[in-house]
Amino acid sequence: MNVKLRVLSAGAIFFLGIAANAQKKKADTVTKTNDIEEVVVLGTYGIKETQEQKVGSYSLVTSKTLEKPNALSVDMAIAGQVSGTVITANSGQPGSNAKVLIRGVSSLTGDNQPLYIVDGVPVLVGDQAGVATTSNALAMIDPTDIESVEVLKDGATTSIYGSRAAAGVIIIKTKSGRGGKGKLTMMAEYGFGTPAFERYKFQTAQEQVDALIKGYMALGQSQAAATSTVLSPSTGLLRGWDGVSNTDWEDATRRSATSSSKYNLNYSFGNEKIKGYASIGNTEQDGIIRDASYKRANASIKIDAKINDKISIVSSNMISRATQFGPLDYGYFANPILSARFTPSTNAIYNADGSYNLSINGGTGNAGFNPVAIQNVNLRKSVFTKILSSFGLNYNILKNLRFSSNLGIDYNYYDENEYRNPDFGDGNNPAAGITGLAIQSNYTYTTVNWSNFFNYDFKINDDHKFTATAGSEATIKISKYPYQASTGFKSQHYEQNNVSWGTTPFATQSYTERYHLIGYIGRLSYAFKDYFNLMGSFRRDGYSHFGADRKYGNFWATGANINLHNIVDISTVFDNLKIRGSYGEVGNIGNQNYKDRATLGQSSYQLLGGYTINNPGNPNLQWEVSRKSNIGLDLAFANNTLKVSFDIYKNLVSEQLTNDIPNAPSTGFGTLTGNSLKHESKGFESSLTYDPIKNDNFSWSINGNYSYNRSKVLNLTGPYLDADYFKRFGVGHDPSEWFLANYAGVDHTNGDALWYTNSSQTTLSNGTATAPTISRDYVGKKSIPTHTAGLTNSFSYKKLTISFLATYAGDFSVYDIWGRYYDADGQDVGIRQVADVANAWSPDNVNATRPQYRPGNSVAKTHSTRYLYKGDYIKLKSAEVGFRLNKDDLKIKDLNSIYLYVRGINLLTFAFDKNLPFDPESNSNTVPSYVGGSGVYDQTQPLLRQIMFGAVIDF
């Protein structure tokens, strides 16, 4: 059997694989073993395996994809390309956070983010900013500098990461140098963008005036009286309207189109002793809102050096700095998305003298919140700095025994400031002691990680082969949170916009968190003639935040495979047929808020300062435990041009951490922190690669994946546990199931809005005081997709290439939590409404699907399924057309090739719900947990449809 090894680091000793034909086999009973393309480095501890040895479930995305990303961050760059993984953006703000789920919900209350490891170092992830509405720590890493992304999903692959691996593990490897002549590559890209999917249509000034007058007339007023109620110069709801002005607030607060650019220069070099890779890059991208932008400068250098035949070293260093400007989202009047929709178009932006119009009429409490004025004067700025460095040593002690050590640091500094002017908006609140407000936060996150491992490969008679790994890993993480704010700013002096200009201290705070984690790891694998393989692993972790008796936890896994194509002759049907199975237990620390020790808070008594106990702690706290089982099948057909994998899995997550353990109220603490919750996720996933055509002139390759996942709550501390944003955990229910009132439509006899009042939906209420009480209930719809899929097609004809990626998500629902204000029946009388209000019920339109519009409607704004939409969609996520000119075409010395391309991102979105007005990829930035914030449209910036023009030049 021919085994081709791809060298992954200088001086490393590789396990040479298993020769299935080492002993003579009868030709009529055994299928010829297929060539093995490469050795896969499984994770970060030097464990290697061939495809014949594969026991667990993992996916690999290579640099071919990552060099042409459709997003700023690596997590979004792989969206739609990994089976069993749901990846969605939180907003269209450049550099925004993303939500990543591997095989469903991993914790009901803790962090569902996977563990990310870059060149052996666990790195900061998620939204860690203090001022920025949304940020993504992974956006600090340029996808162009990444060699591969490996997504580990089952217990066999994740258990060696122990207490941090319940949500899965994503291994990122940066690019290394290569031998031979140096290669210089230049890349330049420029593009523009517009909103990818928005269907909202809001009233014009005249339409709002007409709807209000009609509404007041329906309440019994004459036309003259209704007109006066709306337009009276002194008391009218929309007083001041000149009858002509029609301000488009969305147009005024947005760019007509965004711009983006990216430049990267990298150089790869090397010889027998040393290999290197160096790069510098700059990326700039605007958001659709005028004051939203992201600029990142980055540089990296990686050196692989072979000291001698036994010792090699690897040094990887990366530094990046990003500046992000961006407004609020959520229900703030300083949020330009929301305020542009709330503010009537009858209001002008400027007064006649050119000053800002601060007499905004018609809104609910938003007088003085001129969206354009706030954009032009206020400031929200974040400067992020990241230094990621690692140093690795490989020592070949004996022929089959090697030692590896890796020391790394991930340092992140968040320098952020916010300014709210003293004359209007949130900064103008003298009653609260606020005359302007400036906030400064300087958060730092430092992770130091050191791992040391021995790997030993040996065999007996070429039939029995063993690989043993043993070692330890230590992690220290230190987080510092200094924060200060001042008020007392001078009117009209908006250039004085930092804390030092405030005359009065407003708030100050500083605290530090530190945790230590140490792990001891062992793994053993055994192979017999490439017929079957067995593996087992064990890890024991110690964690500083748990009590003395619970500091250590044990995590283990076992798995096996059978390569049937090497045992019996199945060549007439299959080129490859492998059955895999694994079981493993991994952990989750929840988040750093769960500690065994008591926590204190500042308090006062009789004007004397002091402390109170916020949480008495719990010395019996321990890890959440995820028990992962997996059965897989790998098939290959048609001379290995068609490869298919199937996996069925179950994750049972128990001992989940919660702050809601019932306790005797007489103790002063009605609830305690402890381990109690339990849920499960089950699913199926598949992936496919197919090369239907491959010759010198034309090739066509297909990559596809499909996943199915369902989750269910199994145990709680009481009958239910409320989650954020209209979800409630209930035994037997999906954790992301919506908990809302059930909207029943319109009473066609009088135009009332109706809701069901019971689960059986047999009684109705119109929401008035004399009607039955409207109650919320489980509605049988959830916010996390059951089905996800991705399909990539790549075509190449001579020098022309065409490729596209389409994604699908199905069986989920999304919710507009602010629709009850601007898509309502007159409760907030002055807020601009959707244009469809013109089609509301009336005596002349009794079959309308919209209730009667009644200005001043006293019926409560009910969170209900009225604003719940089917989220299913298909997206043309990316598409590219490129043309390559080679050296023979160019005939320019030292110029090897030029690749010119046009790439589209989010080009087309097909929503299954024709009434859905916002992008179905919606999550809230306000709620940190995946479950609570998933599926919530929270007035965030829309995702962008982008067209990019670029060139890649190789020297």
Image (spheres, rainbow, N blue to C red):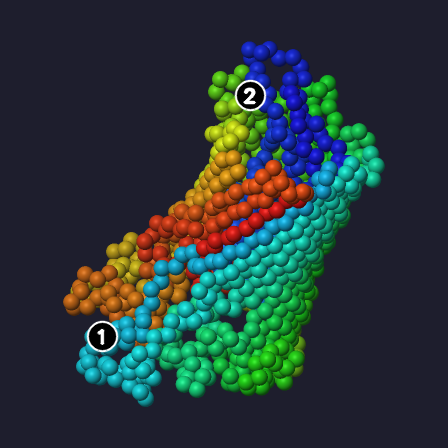
Q: Earlier in the sequence, mark 1 or mark 2?
A: 1
User: Can you say whether 534 is above or below 545 in the image?
Assistant: above
Few, some or many C-alpha atoms within 10 Å of disc 1 (few <14, some 14-19, many ≥20)?
many
Nearer to us in this view, 681 or 659: 681
| Residue at 71%, 30% in the rendered image | 15
Which residue is found at the position 45% from the left and 42% from the top?
789
Number of numbered discs visible in the structure rendering: 2
**Residue type marked 1:** Lys
Q: Which residue is mark 1?
A: 214
Q: Above or below — where is 627 with respect to 923?
A: above
The amino acid beneath tag 2 is His
Q: Looking at the image, which residue is at 46% across and 84% down?
A: 355
In the rendered image, residue 246, in percent from the top left (x then y), is placed at 34, 75
Picture coordinates of residue 520, whole percent (x, y):
72, 43
Looking at the picture, how far across and down is residue 597, in whole percent?
66, 61
The residue positioned 73% from the left and 37% from the top of the image is: 180
- For label 1, the SS is helix
Whole-percent x, y for residue 941 in the image: 46, 62
Q: For the residue carrying disc 2, how many other residues have a C-alpha within 10 Å: few (<14), some (14-19), or many (20+)?
A: many
- Is 718 placed left or right of 159 in the picture? left
Q: Quadrant of the N terminus?
A: top right
Residue farthest to the left, as pictured: 844
SS label for mark 2: helix
Question: Residue pushed farthest bottom?
Answer: 234
The answer, for residue 180, to whether it is visible in the render is: yes
Pointer 2 residue: 565
* Residues at marks 1 and 2, CA–CA distance in whole angstroms: 77 Å
State whether residue 113 is above or below residue 49: below
Tell me if I can see residue 597 in this picture: no
